[in-house]
């Protein structure tokens, strides 16, 4: 028979891996919670049944949008059966959700995953004892090793065909009495199969259930009060404690741990350094610096693999472009058309595509770090810091995703339960340097004589801006609140899976190429037209007359805004910044079109032209800082709008980004310039001191909501 089968489990318990093993599709597998955002559907191999992959959740109480998605699906759409995947290496915490799922009254099988890991540790789990104690069939599997997947399919089909319901656990008498009273009021108003679920939700005073059966809680109020007085606790904690007690008892009976080595496993020993309070962050900085080093370090003596390959590709583009120019000249192709092809499209798109090797190296490294389990450690380390600033470590996961691309980064903020943290994260993810900003970073590094520390600056300044924004934004009432709890176990380190790394790289590269061929191509043509013609639409000589162009007039009109940042009256820079709003790669593409005239387009020539134009390191760094942290590209803005739900909030977010990045650029310019001996006009110092004062005020002003929200949670 064909059934609809749902797959539910805690974050990071191997749900996506199992989904792929069951359906044969290859969803992205992440090594941290929250990678699965929306529910996904596939057909179980060898059957006609559909499998729905739900977001990972810790419980059925709706705290996060994820939990609401899962719960609504199970309650509302009533799948024919449920596979509850349980991480056998974290059995206690995982079974908490299982007990709640069992109460839902849907045919169910527990897939006890990661059994390979359990065996490796030498632990033993008595499946029979556990299964009898829980009242639900349990199939031990290893999703990653594809062990016993057939057994699982067979069992879930059997349970779905025969509509075999799990048997809810029973708890101590006083709680059962109230549950019985609750069931009495609910009878006839909710489906009988789901009775147990609704009864407990009613006792817990759950909002959604109160809506389904309004007033029901009123009639069992006295029973609940009696229970609460007897236990001197709130009803929902009594239920939670009863469940935990039940689980602890069961696990004690069913699980035997092998004696642990005195020194711990190899993973434990590595973690002692990597998650160390003092060493964790320096190690992380060193690793990220090394990644950028491999991707982009370039000097006359030695080039990193990424920089070397970019050089080769660039030469190829330059030769090709020169060949096209020669061919056009020999064939007598119109001068304007030749310029569009070579100075416009090839300078722009070619400059952007040239960065592909750097992107490949960068994402190979980041994907490996993620795959082996290192990034999960970083999230853990960052949680300590974030929590200190009243933020949640959960925010760090979207930031990691955001280093690939801001759009999924913003989207993955959805996994954060607390509304304020979720909004703040969605608003600030794009401070992180995404792959499209890599060409900008590379061009700037080149302009600063190959100093690749600008990459590390971009990465960690991004994190600092997120933390600063958290502190500032939480002082506004709409965004105030306690940080979301962050529970995450650290999976043991394991060897990376080559296929999934290649897939990750390919996804990034393909997105990058597509963007270069569409948005960047379009933008370079527009920029070429605007910069090679004047308002009377006369074609201008790119070497001498560009200052009379339409673009020069438009961009020049706002160039004075950036004078305090040391950009001079160079309209080319403002034009590049504006096109960066379409896509961040466009910044480099536009500079390629505008600065190179008929010199050969190559990354080093763009860097050299930029250094020439700005004249000093301070201005280069200020140009860089503004461009990398200002309003994100259109695609990311749309994603932010989707998460925030209003154009007003989105607009304020963009304004906030622009003002903050302007201040950062200003500080960088003043500090770098002062140290460097660059002449800076006095009014710029005044402006810098004023914005520093404002920023410090916003940072240190008392948070009017922090105290209050603390009390509520106590
Ligand atoms: P999800 O968050 O629940 O979707 O979990 P994923 O499918 O993304 O898996 C989380 C991590 O656990 C990944 O690194 C997987 O490779 C790993 N994993 C999944 N299943 C198993 C398994 O059976 N054994 C082991 N050792 N690791 C697994
Ligand atoms: Mg997943």
Image (tube, rainbow, N blue to C red):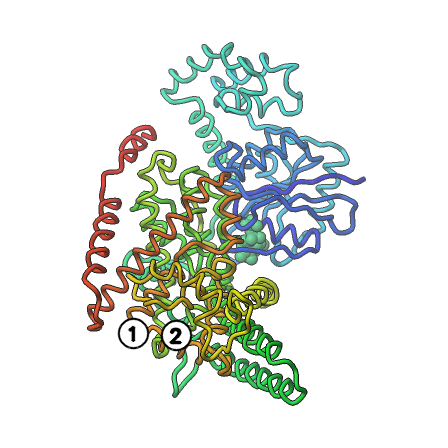
Q: Quadrant of residue 191?
A: top right
Q: Which residue is tagged 1?
A: 616
Distance Cα–Cα, label 2 vs label 1: 10 Å
> Is residue 493 in sight in this rendering?
no
Q: Which residue is tagged 2?
A: 610
Of the pair 475 and 633, the residue shown nearer to us: 633
- Identified at 65% across, 57% down, the residue is 26
Q: Residues within 10 Å of mark 1 (few under 14, many from 20)?
A: many
Of the pair 578 and 537, the residue shown nearer to us: 537
Location of the C terminus by quadrant is: top left
Is disc 2 in contact with disc 1, using a CB cutoff of under 8 Å? no
Q: Quadrant of residue 689?
A: bottom left
- Identified at 48% across, 34% down, the residue is 63
Position of residue 468 measured from the top left corner of the image (x, y, whole percent): 31, 50
Q: Residues within 10 Å of mark 2 (few under 14, many from 20)?
A: many
- Quick one: which residue is furthest to the right in this view? 1
Of the pair 258 and 520, the residue shown nearer to us: 520
Position of residue 68 measured from the top left corner of the image (x, y, whole percent): 55, 35
- Identified at 34% across, 58% down, the residue is 561
Measured along the vertical axis of the image, is residue 644 above or below residue 146? above
Position of residue 42 measured from the top left corner of the image (x, y, whole percent): 70, 48
For the residue with label 1, is its CB less than 8 Å from the closest atom of ligand 1?
Answer: no
Q: Image check: 705 left or right of 9?
A: left
Of the pair 315 and 483, the residue shown nearer to us: 315
Location of the N terminus by quadrant is: top right
């Amino acid at each position: 028979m064909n059934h609809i089968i749902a797959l539910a489990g805690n974050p990071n318990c191997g749900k996506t891996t199992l989904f792929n093993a069951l359906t044969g599709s290859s969803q992205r597998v992440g090594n941290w919670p929250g990678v699965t955002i929306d529910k996904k559907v596939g057909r179980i191999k060898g059957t006609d049944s559909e499998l729905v992959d739900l977001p990972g959740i810790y419980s059925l109480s709706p705290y996060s949008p994820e939990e609401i998605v899962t719960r609504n699906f199970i309650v509302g759409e009533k799948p024919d059966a449920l596979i509850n995947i349980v991480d056998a290496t974290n059995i206690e915490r995982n079974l908490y959700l299982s007990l709640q799922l069992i109460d839902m009254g849907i045919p169910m099988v527990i897939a006890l995953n990661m059994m390979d890991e359990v065996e490796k540790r030498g632990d033993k789990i008595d499946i029979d004892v556990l299964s009898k104690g829980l009242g639900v069939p349990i199939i031990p599997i290893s999703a990653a090793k594809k062990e016993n997947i057939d057994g699982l399919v067979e069992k879930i089909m059997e349970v779905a065909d025969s509509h075999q319901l799990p048997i809810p656990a029973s708890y101590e008498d006083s709680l059962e009495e109230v549950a019985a009273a609750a069931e009495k009021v609910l009878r006839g108003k909710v489906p009988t199969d789901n009775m147990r679920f609704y009864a407990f939700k009613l006792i817990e005073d759950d909002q959604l259930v109160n809506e389904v059966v309004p007033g029901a809680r009123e009639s069992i109020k006295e029973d609940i009060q009696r229970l609460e007085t007897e236990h001197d606790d709130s009803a929902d904690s009594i239920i939670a404690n009863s469940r935990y007690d039940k689980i602890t008892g069961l696990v004690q009976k069913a699980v035997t741990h092998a004696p642990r080595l005195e020194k711990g496993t190899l993973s434990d020993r590595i973690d002692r350094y990597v998650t160390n309070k003092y060493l964790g962050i320096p190690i992380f900085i060193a690793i990220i610096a090394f990644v950028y080093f491999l991707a982009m370090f370039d000097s006359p003596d030695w080039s990193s693999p990424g920089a070397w390959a970019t050089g080769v590709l660039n030469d190829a583009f330059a030769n090709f472009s020169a060949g096209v120019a020669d061919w056009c000249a020999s064939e007598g192709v119109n001068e304007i058309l030749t310029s569009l092809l070579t100075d416009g499209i090839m300078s722009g798109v070619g400059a952007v595509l040239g960065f592909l090797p750097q992107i490949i190296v960068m994402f190979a490294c980041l994907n490996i770090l993620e795959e082996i389990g290192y990034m999960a450690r970083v999230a853990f380390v960052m949680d300590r810091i974030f929590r200190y600033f009243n933020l949640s470590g959960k925010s760090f996961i979207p930031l990691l995703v955001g280093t690939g691309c801001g759009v999924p980064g913003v989207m993955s903020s959805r996994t954060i339960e607390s509304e304020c943290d979720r909004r703040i994260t969605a608003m600030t993810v794009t401070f992180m340097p995404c792959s499209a900003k890599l060409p900008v970073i590379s061009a700037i590094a080149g302009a600063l004589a190959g100093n690749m520390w600008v990459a590390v600056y971009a990465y960690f300044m991004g994190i600092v801006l997120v933390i600063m924004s958290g502190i500032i934004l939480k002082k506004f009432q709409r965004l105030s609140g306690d940080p979301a709890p962050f529970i995450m176990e650290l999976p043991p380190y394991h060897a990376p899976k080559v296929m999934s790394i290649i897939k990750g790289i390919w996804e990034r590269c393909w997105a990058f190429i597509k963007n270069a061929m569409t948005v960047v191509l379009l933008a370079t043509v527009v920029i070429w037209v605007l910069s090679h013609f004047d308002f009377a639409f006369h074609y201008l000589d790119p070497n001498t007359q560009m200052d009379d162009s339409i673009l020069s007039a438009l961009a020049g009109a706002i160039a004075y805004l950036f004078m305090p940042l040391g950009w001079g009256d160079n309209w080319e820079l403002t034009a590049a910044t504006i096109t960066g709003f379409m896509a961040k790669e466009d910044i480099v593409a536009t500079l390629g079109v505008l600065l190179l005239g008929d010199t050969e387009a190559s990354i080093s020539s763009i860097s050299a032209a930029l250094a020439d134009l700005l004249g000093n390191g301070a201005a280069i760094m200020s140009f860089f800082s503004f461009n990398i942290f200002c309003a994100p590209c259109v695609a990311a803005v749309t994603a932010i709008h989707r998460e925030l739900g209003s154009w007003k909030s989105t607009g304020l977010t963009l304004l906030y980004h622009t003002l903050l990045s302007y201040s950062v650029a200003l500080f960088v310019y003043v500090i770098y310039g002062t140290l460097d001996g660059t002449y800076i006009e006095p009014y710029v110092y005044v402006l810098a001191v004023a914005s520093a004062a404002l920023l410090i005020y916003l940072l240190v002003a008392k948070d009017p909501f922090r105290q209050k929200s603390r009390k509520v949670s106590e």
